[in-house]
Amino acid sequence: MEIKAGYKQTEVGIIPEDWEVKPLGRLVLSVEYGSSAKSSTQGQMPVLRMGNLQDGKIDWNDLVYTSNEFEINKYQLRPGNVLFNRTNTIDLVGKTSIYDGERPAIFAGYLIRINVDKSLLNSQFLNYILNTEFSRKYSSKVLSVAVGQANINAQKLKTYPIPLPPNKDEQDAIAQALSDTDALIEALEQLLTKKRQVKQGAMQELLRVKDNWASTNLGSIADPNKRWSYTGGPFGSNLKASDYTDDGIRVIQLQNIGDGEFKPEYEVFTSKQKADELLSCNIYPGEIILSKMGDPVARACIIPSLHERYVMCSDGIRLAVDQKRFSTYFVYTVINAKDFRTKAENAGVGSTRKRIGLTELRSLELFCPPLPEQTAIAEILSDMDAEIATLEGKLSKARQVKQGMMQELLTGRIRLI
């Protein structure tokens, strides 16, 4: 690869000529292991553990506590401390988060506290550096593995290469720019959480059964004028891995059936000839697919218009709704609502992972208002879902922008000073 003028190749990649790479140990005052004191659900002080380090920030859910005064005095965190997860599975060791002092806490023994020399290193800048791809790759080189557990000790942590701009002001500017992006992401996450809560409240109110709502069952909702409007996927022996192709007719796998959403990432195809052989197991855009298998059982989503038709996997169930009497969106919403989900769980079999058959699912009761009211409810909830989807898109874009900014700013490809 040709290196542009003004840049140089280093162990962390290509960086500007006026940047340098230093081992972390030369930029910190100390690296310290955390508390080994016993903790519980009760106590005076939160104890941060591996699971509390999420996406570079502290997750304050699932806390344990201690009241050991000696441990509290010795291991209490200070704003600007960077926490490093020193042991876990290979893909999770090396996670970091920065402690901003939002509430008092100490840190557990599987974590390392990094106290930076503030005259040399911005702690936020370090936290972002340790979450880059080149730092992750370095982690994989220096970790030790025993009985499935990976470990990086304090001495190895001190060897991490840290790319540095020529003055600390540039570190500060980079950290601030990325912090501003994090603030935008956090605001979008909070708004998205609020919108989802509002939708849940609306569902509870709108789906409350009223006097004019009629009892029916899932099988009776299927369109009587369509063949196989309520049917399951093929037997496993009728659609094997050897039938999969690089393109053709898409096969909907369990991984695609999300809880109220179609998940497009996992793609498998079969030939048109095979799809024609399994015509009774075909499903089409705008129809509902349910899962016979948990988690959770009988979760449902609407088939998107990515392709003209699909073939279901063996654990899929097609429901083509009789649109003269029912709103597809209303039915799909009721299927995913708490009351129907509970009925499906109770009708399912299996202790660790529930499974439900066509017959059991067909007879499950649900209540529906007259079609005009179904349509009105569906429009309200559909508008909410569209708003949530728009926010999810913005959040995804913001996260992508941040990743791009990290790649550019932390290697000096874009200079802020």
Image (cartoon, rainbow, N blue to C red):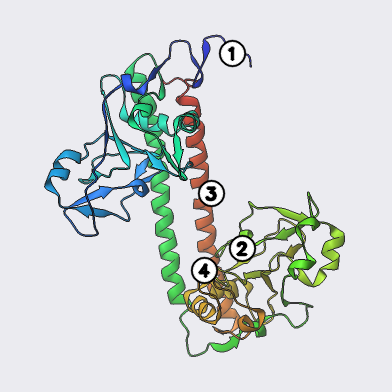
Which corner quadrant of the image does residue 263 belong to? bottom right
Most distant residue in the front direction: 147
Q: Dots 2 and 4: beta carbons under 8 Å?
A: no
Near mark 4 (Cα within 10 A), the count class, few <14, some 14-19 or many ≥20, is some
CA gap between label 4 and label 3 equals 20 Å
Which corner quadrant of the image does residue 277 belong to? bottom right
Near mark 1 (Cα within 10 A), the count class, few <14, some 14-19 or many ≥20, is few
Per the rendering, the mark at residue 243 is none
Question: Is the C terminus in the top left, top right, bottom left or bottom right quadrant?
Answer: top left
Residue holding disc 1? 3
Residue flagged by tag 2: what amino acid is it? Ile
Q: Residue at x 67, y 69 (%)?
A: 316
Q: Nearer the viewer, mark 1 or mark 4?
A: 1
For residue 123, above or below residue 100: above
Secondary structure under the numbered disc 1 in the rendered image: loop
Q: Give the side of residue 100 with respect to residue 223, left or right.
A: left
CA gap between label 2 and label 1 equals 46 Å
CA gap between label 2 and label 3 equals 20 Å
Viewer-closest of 131 and 11: 11
Q: Residue at x 39, y 47 (%)?
A: 187
Per the rendering, the mark at residue 257 is 2
Residue holding disc 4? 380
**Counting residues from the N terminus, which is met first, the one under dot 2 or under dot 1?**
1
**Counting residues from the N terminus, which is met first, the one under dot 2 or under dot 4?**
2
Q: Residue at x 38, y 52 (%)?
A: 190
Per the rendering, the mark at residue 393 is 3
Q: Dots 3 and 1: beta carbons under 8 Å?
A: no
CA gap between label 2 and label 4 equals 23 Å
Near mark 3 (Cα within 10 A), the count class, few <14, some 14-19 or many ≥20, is few
**Counting residues from the N terminus, which is met first, the one under dot 3 or under dot 1?**
1
Question: Is the N terminus in the top left, top right, bottom left or bottom right quadrant?
Answer: top right
